[in-house]
Amino acid sequence: MNVLVLMGSPRLKGNTAHLCKPFMEEMAMLGAQVKYVTLADKKILPCRGCYLCQQVENTYGCPQQDDMAAIIPLIQWADLMVLATPIYAWYCAAPMKNLLDRHYGLNKFYGSAKGSLWAGKQVALICTHGYDAAYATDPFVMGMERLCAHSHLEYRGMYSVRDEDDLSSFQTPEACQGARDFARSLIR
């Protein structure tokens, strides 16, 4: 299994990054090929809504020149995409939001081009948050479930940890074991 972890926190070594470590270690131990991409240090421009990507067959087709050009082949390589993000104001952090908004070029539903460049991929979430899990993450989970249904992706679930004591909340044996257990649940 090819696993792409897209880490969307603006803090490259913060809570979300720490929660990804035991998850990726477990995935690798189970034989998965894992690639880890941090988004905060990439240039990912917001979608302009120009729909030019919808006129280009068999390729992503976005005219913007940024780091999405390097991320798209990784998305296409992956069997499973893990979107790792802190939850701010009931949704993902800005680097992740820009990436998600740029999905249009992978779905050819709105112009002369037809088809999908990522149908059948699996998507899972790793989230960190301050409020209780459901209260904090439900809007993001709902958005991702809808994106997956619309894009013919398979939503595989979420693992989340509440921030109760900053970084130490994400380094407890329970938090690390939960990330490892989530990895095992995603291997088929």
Image: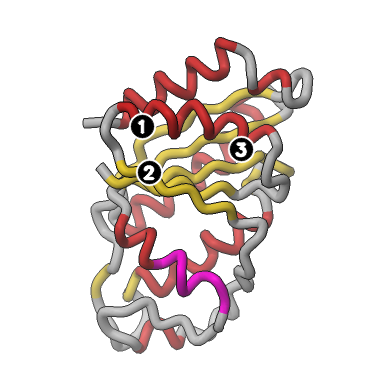
Gap between marks 2 and 3, in whole Å? 15 Å
> Is residue 69 one of those drawn in magenta?
yes
In front of the other: 78 or 97:
78
x, y (%) of residue 150?
35, 57
Q: How many marks?
A: 3
Q: What residue lies at 54% left-to-right and 71% top-to-bottom?
A: 67
Gap between marks 1 and 2, in whole Å? 7 Å
Residue for badge 2: 34
- Mark with earlier residue (2, 3): 3
- Mark with earlier residue (1, 3): 3
On the image, which quarter does residue 169 sit in?
Answer: top right
- Mark 1 and mark 2 in contact? Answer it, CB < 8 Å: yes
On the image, which quarter does residue 139 sit in?
Answer: top right
Judge whether residue 145 can be spotted in this image.
no
x, y (%) of residue 47?
58, 74
Q: Quadrant of the N terminus?
A: top left
The three-letter amino acid code for the residue at tag 2 is Val
Q: What residue lies at 46% left-to-right and 81% top-to-bottom?
A: 62
Gap between marks 1 and 3, in whole Å? 15 Å
The three-letter amino acid code for the residue at tag 1 is Met
- Mark with earlier residue (1, 2): 1
In front of the other: 103 or 31:
31
**Residue lying at the far left of the rendered structure:** 188
31 w.r.t. 108: above or below: above
Dot 1 alpha-carbon crowd within 10 angstroms: few under 14, some 14 to 19, many 20 or more: many
Q: What residue lies at 46% left-to-right and 69% top-to-bottom?
A: 70
Q: Main secondary structure of the magenta part?
A: helix
The magenta segment is: 66-72
Looking at the rendered structure, which numbered label has been put on residue 27? 1
107 w.r.t. 36: above or below: below
Q: Quadrant of the C terminus?
A: top left
140 w.r.t. 168: above or below: below
